[in-house]
Amino acid sequence: MTKEKLKELLNKMSLTDKIYQLIQIASNFYTEDGMKLTGPIEELGINEEILWNSGSVINAKGAKSVKEIQDKYLSKNKHKIPLLFMADVINGYKTIFPIPIAQGCSFDEKAVYDIAKASAKEATTSGCHVTFSPMVDLCRDSRWGRVMESAGGEDPYLGSIMAKATVEGYQGNNIKDKNSIASCVKHFAAYGAGVAGREYNSVDMSRRELFQNYLPPYKAAIDAKASMMMTSFNIIDGIPATANTWLMKDLLRNKWKFDGVLISDYSAIKEIFVHGNAKDEKEAAKKALNATCDIDMMTNLYTNNLYSLVKEGSIKESQVDDAVMRILTLKNDLGLFENPYKDASEIEEQLNHLSKENLELSKEASGKTFVLLKNNNILPLDKNKKIALIGPHVNNKNIVGNWSIFADKNSVKSLKEAFLENYNEEYLKIFEGCNMLASFEYDPIFTSIGQSPLIIDNEELVNELLIKEACEGAMDADVIVLAIGEHQRQTGEACSRTNLEIPYYQQKLLIALKALNKPIVTLLYNGRPLAIKDVLDSSDAVLEVWYPGTNGNSAVVDTLFGKINPSGKLNMSFPYNAGQCPIYYNHYQTGRPHIKDERYVSRYIDAPTNPLLPFGFGLSYSNFIYNSIKLDNNILTKNNKLNVTVSITNDSKYNGYEVVQLYIQDVYGSIVRPVKELKGFKKVFFNANETKEVSFILNTKMLEFYDNNCKKIIENGLFKVYIGTNSRDVLETEFEVIYLNNKN
């Protein structure tokens, strides 16, 4: 449909018709039970007229359901405007891939692109038009449960790379193309900076900090032509993001030229009133529309208030028109006016869901995301050794992340099943070690949301017996493989934690096994950085596998036995304890930096200042030695570039990949700069005993930063360049910048 035809359609619509296009409701409202207009649908004030004229729905399940809803909707909709179907497709649809925080640890944008592309193909065959992904919030505090959704972790550069790759993987060359899906980036903006790591909490930061560190991944996603943006729940400069005209209108729309659809997060428009930024719900609706928020997700504030606001002159009908036009344009860009089903097909679902190709990709991608945290020459394992496989994650299939709402649990391969496919059963003993319910300890919220009971009958006795059984069974084993970590429901939205340690009974299990004086290989299944010093101390090897997805455990076993050489690197620092949070590598220097044995410096008296494991950390079965670093010139101007080279040797018998990381420090400036910032990385393959030179190009664009007026500048001065295997272990050299006019 041409733009002129869209305008003709808009002009035919009444004000009420237009307002309905701005409403998003749940797909279950269109089922037989939902159409009885009871329960949640009644609370929202949804009547038959609204039901058959609303603009979009969320989380419909399956091509058949989507087609049935769309058919009935179009038979009743007066203007025959198709519904827009959106869904939470975060790390896969039916085939589940590693959670986003794990994907970022691959430092492999091609792998992230492939995951998004495969996810889009499965989702679109089930009738999905828009995915609420990627989440590109900068995450520096692992107490926040939603760090699991951020591929960029604590770094804006990595976050920008991963945001671009994900959007392009979902959308392809054109969202109208077969198996392409529109990407909705979230949460705009700075949602990851909630005070104390608490979900839905306030955010308080300078505008310069916002521009410097938090906004770049959103901008990268927009530059990749993301179709939609979702508002965040938090405040920015004391104003809820959904009502923040500076953030949404001045910055997003006018400065960044984003002309896509802006949608509130779930009930965020109503929360403008709850925040205390509006005297009533009517004013909240007005503020959201003034901030150019197009879609009201799951509240009745637009339906109840926009009509009267227009009629009384508090808002202009042209504002409603603009919002509707953006929604109609997205529907048109997706080709829904010609084909309201787009790619929905029960036949295609059968062919694409959990296909051999996607299951192989799930395994391959998972293998790139594992991070080897410790290895005392125990890995890779010898298949001729007797193994005791122990832990609550041995039989657990809930390893897909808690946003995998379309996943088929039965299709997930457990660790036990993956072992039995690859290892002689007569050499393997399997024990639970402790009940998985122990992971719910100190978290009574799970009982109130319908999960398993917090306390099982005779919990202490049951777990003591399980621990005893595991220890007795491991007596004649040559090595113990221990699978521990968080319960899947302990991480994700609404899962902020103040205790980042391994659950109590899992700790007891590890201590008991350690007393056997046998080698222990610990596998960590979790969705956030944990406080694991005791785990590291008690284990001979530790492999972080996150929530690896449908076929991820196959990759776990292949890694344990050396078919896969781990190459992942941490995208978030691991703290010693929760009291260090937020903690991140690219911090600012204080006037009294930590100096050993000095008292009156910036430090803790009961914990180290630095993290347990730094950003970029990750071991390999290969032993990479960084030999020397050199620059071809030590003066950088706006008219030249520098070449910095490092020599690296793989001093081992194992072929493997190394993520070579480039950091830069602006030593002094008009604005205090971080101690170092990631500015580039390369994932390089080395044969056994091979030496290579790896080079990076330095240019002045990499040295830009924001001044106190939020303007990008480059300054003359001394800079250090670091190259290394992580943000801590680096080689360094320095150069001088002579940039004459200091203007961008």
Image (cartoon, rainbow, N blue to C red):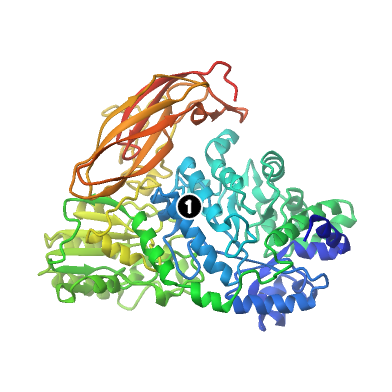
Horizontal and vertical percent for residue 496? Answer: 46, 56
Vertical placement of residue 198 versus 720, above or below: below
Dividing the picture into quadrants, the one containing residue 181 is bottom right
In this picture, residue 350 sits left or right of residue 270: left
What residue sits 33% from the left and 55% below the top?
370
Give SS at disc 1.
loop
Identify residue for label 1. 150
* Image position, residue 19 (x, y; %): 80, 62
Q: Residues within 10 Å of mark 1 (few under 14, many from 20)?
A: many
Residue 729, placed above or below residue 417: above
Decide if residue 64 is on the left or right side of residue 169. Answer: right
Residue 265 location, quadrant: bottom right
Question: Label 1 is placed on what type of residue?
Answer: Ser
Q: Position of residue 171 (x, y in %)?
A: 58, 57
Placement of the C terminus among the 4 image quadrants: top right
Q: Residue furthest left?
A: 476
Quadrant position of residue 342: bottom right
* Residue at horizontal 35 percent and vertical 46 percent from the top: 575
| Whether residue 496 can be seen here | no
Nearest the camera: 466 or 185? 185
The residue positioned 53% from the left and 75% from the top of the image is 349
